[in-house]
Structures are given as structure tokens and as C-alpha cells.
Amino acid sequence: MEVLLAVALLVPLVYLVAVVGRVQAGTFAAETAAREAVRAVVTAESAGQGAARAEAAVRIALRDQDLPEDAASLDLECGHAVCLTPGGDVAAVVHVAVPLPLVPRTFGSRVPTVVRVDAAHVGTVDRYAAVRP
């Protein structure tokens, strides 16, 4: 009887620890992706190159936390019409959908199968850099 009670209490506790661990990994991925995406843009030679480098930074951050590459989306915003204007701001918002462990996606209509995590970061383009396209 005591064994059944112990198992009945431990299984949900172990699952809770697994869920919290995955959500924390998603949070780490989102924070790192937002920070590195901004860094990739403000140090790029052009806005196009910066956007491509930012997308690569997001994929790397997701891979580091064992999350699928399609689990995140990146929104970049520039403070000026020309994105890499010296002294201008560049903002990145990363949205990550963290899949819950052991929950099949077929239950999506009845039970949430993902936890959404968002992170934002703002960086400034070097004030003394040349204007870049």
C-alpha cells in the first residue's frame, strides 16, 4: 500500500520537474537568441546580412537547448528608417514554443501541448561606425 502511495506521489513530481526543466531551457534559448540576434545585427556590414546572421543566432540558441529549429520566431525592429544608422536602436523579440514532454500533439485541442516563452533585447548601433545600408 505504501509503495503505491509513494509511486502515486512521485510520478507527478518527476513530471513536474521535467516540465519545469524544459520551460527553463526554452527561457534560456529565448534570452540567448534575442541577445545574440541584436548583436548579430548591430555588428553586420548590412541590414540584410544582419537579418541572416540573427536568424542563424536563433537557430544556434535553440539547438543548444535541444529545441526544434522551427520552435521559435524572430521579430526585428529598427529605430530608424535605415536600420544600421549610427546611434540607432535595434530590437529583437523572440517567441519560443516549448513542447511539453510526453504530451502528444494530437491532444492539442484538449490539452495545451506547448508553453510559449518570449524574450526581448535592445541594442545600439555603434555611434562612431560608418552608415551601412
Image (cartoon, helix red, strand yellow):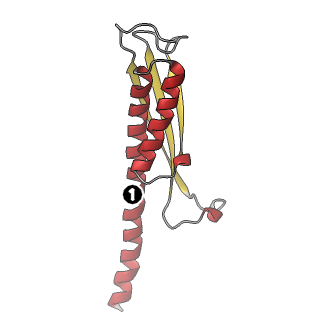
- Residue 33: quarter of image: top left
Q: Please state the horizontal and vertical placement of residue 68, each as a whole percent of the image.
A: 51, 52
Front residue (pair 7, 102)? 102
Q: How many numbered dots are placed on residues in this image?
A: 1
Q: Please state the horizontal and vertical placement of residue 114, each as a whole percent of the image.
A: 54, 54
Taking the image as shown, residue 46 lies to the left or right of residue 125, namely: right
Pointer 1: what residue? 20
Please name the residue shown 42% across and 43% down the image.
61
Name the amino acid, label 1.
Answer: Val
Please name the residue shown 41% across and 68% down the image.
15
Front residue (pair 42, 99)? 42
Quarter of the picture holding the N terminus: bottom left
Q: Relative to residue 61, is residue 124 depicted above or below?
A: above
Kind of element beneath mark 1: helix
Front residue (pair 4, 83)? 83
Front residue (pair 50, 1)? 50
Please name the residue shown 47% across and 31% down the image.
54
Taking the image as shown, residue 71 lies to the left or right of residue 25, namely: right
Q: Relative to residue 2, is residue 22 depicted above or below?
A: above
Q: Hey, which residue is sitting farthest bottom in the picture? A: 1
Q: Please state the horizontal and vertical placement of residue 3, each as a whole percent of the image.
A: 34, 88
Q: Relative to residue 25, is residue 41 depicted above or below?
A: above
Residue 127 in view (yes/no): yes
Please name the residue shown 41% across and 71% down the image.
12
| CA neighbours of label 1 inside 10 A, class few (<14), some (14 to 19), many (20+) | few
- Residue 113: quarter of image: bottom right
Q: Relative to residue 15, is residue 127 depicted above or below?
A: above
Residue 118 in view (yes/no): no
Q: Please state the horizontal and vertical placement of residue 67, each as a whole percent of the image.
A: 47, 52
